[in-house]
Amino acid sequence: MSTQETTSKQDQYTLWQIIGIWASVALPMALLAWVVAPAIIPYSPLHPGITYWLLTLVGMGWQFIVSLVIIYRELGTLRWSAIRQRTWLQTPRDPGTDQPNARLFWWVLPALFLSALVNLVLTRYLNAPMHWLFPTLQPALYEDMSQLATPELQSQWWLLGVALVSCIFNYFLGEEFLFRGVLLPKMKGVFGKYDWVANAVFFGLYHLHKPWAIPSIIASGLTFSWPARRFRSNWMAIIVHGVEGLLLLVMVIAVILGLAAG
């Protein structure tokens, strides 16, 4: 029996444990977006979009804390070597031999293509049913990052620091660490070979703070979770998901330089 088969049968989460971990990060983020943000934005000296952005960073920071607590309770240590193995932060492994093979990183390319297809072409079609079912459910203006393109934010280079921190927590220490690192390796006991699909669904439903986008987020999440599960390497998910961060950095630089102002 291979190491992969042995590991997959040990210490798997129950459905209630998975739901509990999901709720521990989804509900606080929803609270920040739906309750805290509207309450404090009218009194914040910052641009409304920046205030909202900083609140989402608090939510992602909380995900990191939750992940570390879970890892420590399971392993009794936070050594990098132990975390790497537990969360699949390793070279892709051949599904047949369970041996590391860096050439499998090439599978990132089709995953990136599918992710781009979802995000650039299919998003509005996937999310259309949400708009039909809940026509009054719309994002607040301050949730739209394009609203940051204002003269008051030109030359504000500290925004680039906020963007970099946001990328680190969104694509590595926050969402990816918890959903693909903590959850995905331990979902097979409940969902079997479809654990990667269930992972994408839980990832989408975590976005209660922007429910109108849940269908497209689930579809996008499939492009992260499949290569991570297939090759037991969350570096692949981090790369595919993290490309979005490059677009964010470009947009923020454009705002700072005044290139995005209307």
Image (cartoon, rainbow, N blue to C red):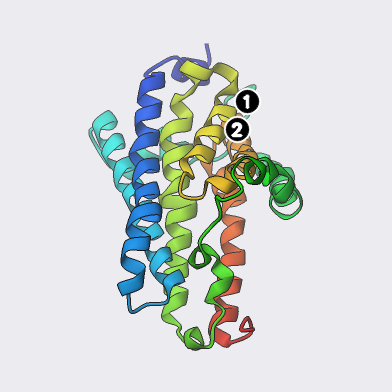
Quarter of the rendering containing residue 91: top right
Instruction: Name the residue nearer the viewer: 82 or 100.
Output: 82
- Residue shown at 59%/47% (left/top)? 213
Instruction: Name the residue nearer the viewer: 249 or 217.
Output: 217
Q: Amino acid at mark 1?
A: Pro
Q: Answer yes or no: do the residues labelled 2 and 1 have beta carbons within 8 Å?
A: yes
Q: Secondary structure at mark 2?
A: helix
Is 19 situated above or below 137? above
The residues tagged by marks 2 and 1 sit, at their Cα atoms, a distance apart of 6 Å
Instruction: Name the residue nearer the viewer: 219 or 147.
Output: 147
- Residue shown at 45%/83% (left/top)? 157
Q: Mark 1: few, some, or many residues within 10 Å (few <14, many ≥20)? A: few
Residue 152 horizontal/vertical position (percent): 48, 87
Is 126 situated above or below 251? above
Q: Is residue 206 left or right of residue 104?
A: left
Residue 214 horizontal/vertical position (percent): 57, 43
- Residue shown at 75%/49% (left/top)? 117
Q: Mark 2: few, some, or many residues within 10 Å (few <14, many ≥20)? A: many
Q: Is residue 229 visible?
A: yes
Q: Secondary structure at mark 1?
A: loop
Quarter of the rendering containing residue 247: bottom right
Q: Is residue 174 left or right of residue 78?
A: right
Q: Is residue 102 visible?
A: no
Q: Amino acid at mark 2?
A: Phe
Q: Which residue does the numbered mark 1 point to in the structure image?
A: 95
Residue situated furthest top in the rendering:
1
Q: Which residue does the numbered mark 2 point to in the structure image?
A: 231
